[in-house]
Amino acid sequence: MSDPLSEVSRRTRLLLFLYSNKNLAGSALAIAGLGLHFVGLIGGLWLPIVAGLYGIGFLGAPNKRDYDLTLGSELTAQAIGTRLSEFVTRVSNQVEPDVLERVKHIRDSIDSLLPRLLQQETVGDRSLFTVRQTAVEYLPATLQSYIRLPIAFRRFHTVRAGKTPKALLLEQLDLLDTKMKEIVTSVAENDTQALLVNGRFLEEKFGKGGFLLTPPESR
C-alpha cells in the first residue's frame, strides 16, 4: 500500500511542517523572545536570541511517533478479534472521542461476524473476505494515515471541499460503519449478492490507500 503522505503537493508538505509540534513549539518561544525585545529586556542581540529560542523549541519538542497499526494479513479469525481489541486500545489516546466512537462501532460489527468467519475458514469459503480486509487493512490504514497528521492540521486546516482531515475521516468511518452493519444484516439473511456488492464497494473505496490526504488543486 502506498504512503499517502508521499503523494501530497509541496504546498501541503509545507503546511504539515507549519502545523507540526516542533514548529509550533519553536514559534511560541520565538514570539516570547520578540515580546521581551519589544518591552526592552533584550536589545541589539534580539535577532539571534529569537532565532536561538526558536531552535530550542524546535529541537526540544518530541518527534511525532510513526505508529504502525497494521494487524497482519495472515491472522486467523480468532486472532483478528484479539488484535482488533489491541488496535482500539492503541488508537484511543491518539484520536478524538467522536473518532474513537465510530472505530468502536466498526469493531463491534466485525466482532459479531468473527464466529461466522471462523466457520468459513475451515471450508475455504471467502464470502466474508471483506470483513477480514476491513479488520486487517481498511480500518488500520485509514486510522494510521490520519494519526500521522499534526493534530492542529487535521482539526483546523481544510484540504478538500472545504473540509478538514477530521471531517473527511468521520465521513469515511461513517461509511465503513454503515457498510459493515449492512454486511451483518446480509449474513443474518444469507444474502450472498448483497455481500458481494458491499465487498466490491469497500474494495474500491478503501483498497487503494485508505485515508488519502490529497489537496484540492491536484484532484
Image: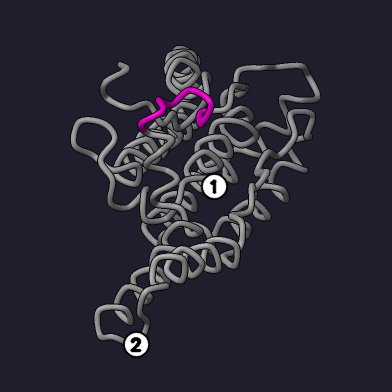
To which residue does mark 1 refer? Answer: 107
Say which of 170 and 42 sits in front: 42
Q: Is residue 69 left or right of residue 96?
A: right
Q: Is residue 134 above or below residue 205?
A: below
Please tell me whether residue 207 belongs to the stretch shown in magenta.
no
Q: Position of residue 159 (x, y in %)?
A: 29, 35
Residue lying at 37% horizontally and 74% vertically, measured from the top left: 44
In front: mark 1 or mark 2? 2
Query: Looking at numbered disc 1 in the image, what kind of residue is underneath it?
Result: Arg
Say which of 143 and 48 sits in front: 48
Q: Position of residue 175 (x, y in %)?
A: 35, 34
- Are the two marked residues, 1 and 2, in contact with CB atoms closer than 8 angstroms? no
Asked where in the image residue 76 lies, by quadrant, the reply is top right
Residue lying at 54% horizontally and 31% vertically, measured from the top left: 138
N-terminal of the pair, mark 1 or mark 2, is 2
What secondary structure is found at the residue carrying circle 1?
helix
Say which of 176 and 153 sits in front: 153
Magenta stretch: dominant SS?
A: helix
Residue lying at 51% horizontally and 48% vertically, measured from the top left: 147
To which residue does mark 2 refer? Answer: 41
Say how many tags the image has. 2
Residue lying at 79% horizontally and 29% vertically, measured from the top left: 74
Query: Looking at numbered disc 2 in the image, what kind of residue is underneath it?
Result: Leu
Q: Report the quarter where the C terminus lies.
A: top left
